[in-house]
Image (cartoon, rainbow, N blue to C red):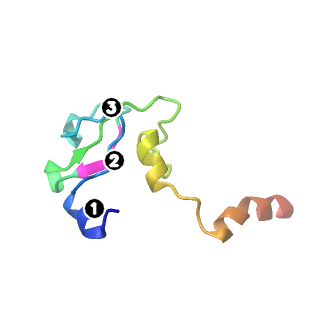
Amino acid sequence: MRTAAMIIAGIAPPQAPGCNSLGRRLADLTSHQCHFPLRGEGAETRFCAVEVSPADWRPGASGGQYCTFHRCIVVGRGTPAERQAPRVLERLG
C-alpha cells in the first residue's frame, strides 16, 4: 500500500496499461491525453499521457481529463448522502 509520503514523493505511482513509465511534461501533452500526475514538481511534473477516447474526455468533470484507469482511482463512490442525492432529487422533482 502506498503512503501519503510515497504519493507526494512520486514513488511507485499507479500506472495505466500502455503508460510510458517516464510520463510526459504538461507542455508535451496533446489533446485527449491523460493528465494524471505521476511524479515531479512544477514545470517538471510528469503526466500519464495515455490516449483518452473523445467519448471519455470530459474537462471540468471529476477525473474528466484522466484515462479510465486513473479515473477509477480518483473518483470514488461518494459518501452515503452523496449516493442518496439522486433518489432524493427524484422525489422532490
| Residue placed under numbered mark 2 in the picture | 36
Residue 8's spot in the image, x, y percent? 24, 64
| Residue placed under numbered mark 1 in the picture | 7
The residue most toward the left is 44
Q: Given contact means CB atoms under 8 Å apart, are the residues at marks 3 and 2 in contact?
A: no
Residue in the picture at 42% in, 39% down: 67
Give the spatial CA distance, label 1 vs label 3: 21 Å
Q: Is residue 60 visible?
A: no
Quadrant of the image containing the C terminus: bottom right
| Residue placed under numbered mark 3 in the picture | 18
Residue in the picture at 48% in, 29% down: 54
- Is 84 on the left or on the right of 75, as rendered? right
Density class for disc 1 (Cα within 10 Å; few <14, some 14-19, many ≥20) is some
Amino acid identity at mark 3: Gly
Q: Name the residue nearer the viewer: 51 or 93.
A: 51
Residue 66 location, quadrant: top left
Residue 65's spot in the image, x, y percent? 41, 43
Q: Name the residue nearer the viewer: 15 or 58.
A: 15
- Is 1 on the left or on the right of 55, as rendered? left
Q: SS at mark 1?
A: helix
Residue 78 location, quadrant: bottom right
Magenta range is 34-38
Secondary structure that dominates the magenta span: loop
Amino acid identity at mark 1: Ile
Density class for disc 3 (Cα within 10 Å; few <14, some 14-19, many ≥20) is few
Please tell me which of labels 2 and 1 falls first in the chain.
1
